[in-house]
Amino acid sequence: MSETDASPPVLERQGTRATIRLNRPKHLNHLQADDLDVLLSLFAEIEADAALRVLVLTGTGRAFSAGYDLNSVAERATSAVEQRSAGSAFEAVVNRLEDIGIPTICRLNGGVYGGSTDLALACDFRIGTDTSEMFMPAARLGLHYYKSGIARYVTRLGLDNAKRLFLTAEKIGAAEMLRIGYLTAMVPPEALDEEVDRLVTTLAGNAPVAMRGMKQTINEIARGELDAEAADRRHRDSMRGDEIKEGIRAFSEKRPPRF
């Protein structure tokens, strides 16, 4: 792909699967200001399509993403107002990704750096190759990262790993990413698509309403913001809903459920 082929993120559909592809490979798919609005628009489009069951986020080329464009950060650093706007815009995109109702998979086709480490962490699953690597350079750049991103590191990876990655700004490889729980699975590059497809098939075959509700409850618990009454209501509704009827019927008939 030539630089003239580079573009903002693109959306591809295949049956019940949506794929968003970061598409600036010459610059390791770094995100520009305009890309943030595009991503929010694509997220809304996916949420509005009831036929979609799973979202895969990936990159074009040899890296997943180098994060937010440092030149854009530097330009906005000249103004406190603009700096807050840039930071909050990126944070809003990552938080919105975390809250998408359908399951999300980050297909880490290579390295993941800076803010894009949080973008990937906002996905429900992260499948990476054994050549993947990551680092969070905030401490080297003199940047205090936004609070929801730090919270995601702490709740997903644990206090000690969050401190290590943020405060040392050291680069770690795929095996260590797997050990600390950043990666859900690690595979050779040639097996990446097969592993992602396997997980997509599993998720797409499960009960969508039950998964959406449980994902919301899990995220709320992780953030310390559980709406217990709403979670109880979703549980009670599921006990008399169509999904559980089909699930029990399929179990008794020894066949896959059809949700």
Image (cartoon, helix red, strand yellow):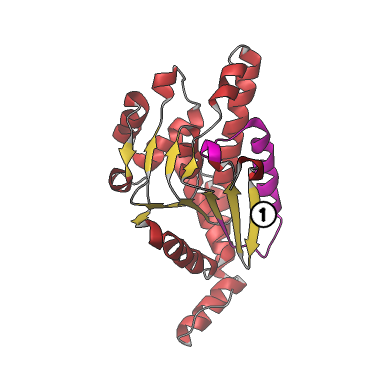
**Up/down of 235 relative to 227, above or below:** below
**Up/down of 151 relative to 41, above or below:** above
Residue nearest the observer in this picture, 124 or 193: 193
**Up/down of 147 relative to 83, above or below:** below
Question: For the residue marked with disc 1, what is the amino acid?
Answer: Ile
Q: Residues within 10 Å of mark 1 (few under 14, many from 20)?
A: many
Q: Residue furthest bottom?
A: 253
Q: Position of residue 33 (x, y in %)?
A: 65, 31
Queried whether the magenta region covers residue 111, the answer comes back as no
Residue nearest the observer in this picture, 163 or 169: 169
Q: Position of residue 243 (x, y in %)?
A: 58, 72
Secondary structure of the residue carrying numbered label 1: helix
Residue 105 seen from this side: yes
Query: Disc 1 marks which residue?
Result: 46
Query: Quadrant location of the C terminus?
Result: bottom right
Q: Residue at x 53, y 78 (%)?
A: 257
Queried whether the magenta region covers residue 46, the answer comes back as yes
Q: Position of residue 216 (x, y in %)?
A: 54, 50
Q: Position of residue 117 (x, y in %)?
A: 45, 38
Q: Residue furthest front?
A: 2
Residue nearest the observer in this picture, 110 or 214: 110
Residue 29 seen from this side: no
* Quadrant in the rendering for residue 82: top right
Say whether residue 164 is left or right of residue 195.
left
Question: What range of the chain is rendered magenta?
Answer: 26-55
Residue nearest the observer in this picture, 125 or 140: 140
Q: Residue at x 44, y 31 (%)?
A: 150
Q: Residue at x 49, y 37 (%)?
A: 116
* Quadrant in the rendering for residue 112: top left
**Up/down of 125 relative to 74, above or below:** below
